Amino acid sequence: MAGSIELREVTFDNLHAVCALSATLTPGQKECVADNVVSVAQGLLAENAWMRAVYSEGSPVGFIMVDTHFADAPEEDHRACFLWRFMIARAWQRTGLGSAALGLVIEAFRAHGYRVLYTSCEVENDESPLGFYLGHGFENTGETDEGGEEILRLSLSDAPPARPMLPMAPRIALVTVWTDEMEPMKRFYTETLGFLVKNDLGEYVELEHNGVRFAICRRAVMESHSDAFSVRPAGQRFELAFPCSSRSDVDATYESLIAAGAGPVAGPQDMPWNQRTALFSDPDGNIHEVFADLRSGEQEGDD
């Protein structure tokens, strides 16, 4: 869980812990950002490096280095700085902590009269941070640096204020399916889809398989807690998506599900977003899907 966050100077006392964070990254992420040992060494030798460790709840979880004088920026952008290195340890990724840390950097340099923050990133890598930066207001300049990375630009006058950290991690721990008919739904998710019962209280059943956990609950159980639960939903309210390893597995799984009692909605077809998808429904009419990512080699092999 991400809690309070702050930026601290990199010192002899925390240097080892900061450098060790790089080992937590995936191989793809390591291709996108230099090892922290290398970054710290470069920062110590550079003239204008601003290095900070990202701390959450008193522990180092990331590293940031900014070039405080980006000489290559157009004259109209000065004062400009360059986000040289930015990493968050894997266990704290997708918790909102990276957004909060970037917000602190933006606030710090905006307060010191900087007008523009630049950065660059690898875009060909599947784990490129390009989407993260674009989602935080950076714009692609259309230029690349000497290493082939695309250069991004953020006007600090237009940048939004730092996002507050929530006292929770934005991760979904449990999905609850509301129903008026427990037994048909329980049989469907256990016998047809193969989920295991983790906890069965009759009106509330928790299911689990391979780390995926969700629950089925009779709607009437919660009506005494809030009148909102007595309002009947209209239309498709949620979807569960089940991955397959190949397009042929999608076809075979769909046939098996329909034969086992799932409602047919749409047979397997290749979708514009490069997936093969088939749709089926549970006893309450909720529409779910099985899918597989389509790779060019696989498509050619199946033709």
Image (spheres, grey):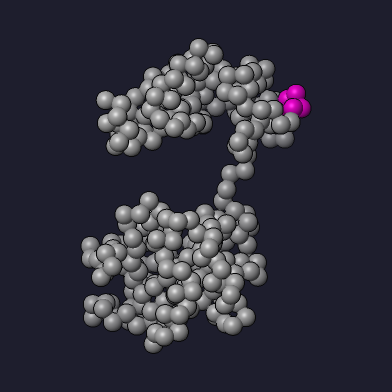
Residue 67 horizontal side relative to residue 89, left or right:
left
- Which residue is nearer to you in this view: 86 or 169? 86
Query: Measuring 45% from the left and 80% from the top, which residue is drawn there?
Result: 41
Q: From this viewpoint, which residue is outermost toward the bottom?
A: 47
Query: Measuring 32% from the left and 57% from the top, which residue is drawn there?
Result: 123
Q: Which corner quadrant holds the C terminus?
A: top left
Q: In the image, residue 103 lies at what x, y percent?
A: 47, 67
Q: In the image, residue 128 lies at what x, y percent?
A: 38, 56
Q: Which residues are magenta?
A: 200-205
Query: Measuring 58% from the left and 19% from the top, which residue is drawn there?
Result: 192
Q: In the image, residue 262 lies at what x, y percent?
A: 52, 16
- Which residue is nearer to you in this view: 99 or 192? 192
Residue 99 horizontal side relative to residue 73, left or right:
right
Residue 135 drawn above or below residue 217 = below
Q: Quadrant of residue 193?
A: top right
Residue 79 covered by magenta stretch: no
Q: In the image, residue 111 lies at what x, y percent?
A: 44, 79
Q: Quadrant of residue 260?
A: top right
Residue 203 covered by magenta stretch: yes
Query: Measuring 52% from the left and 24% from the top, which residue is drawn there?
Result: 286
Q: Quadrant of residue 157?
A: bottom left
Q: From this viewpoint, which residue is outermost toward the right?
A: 201
Q: Which corner quadrant holds the N terminus?
A: bottom right
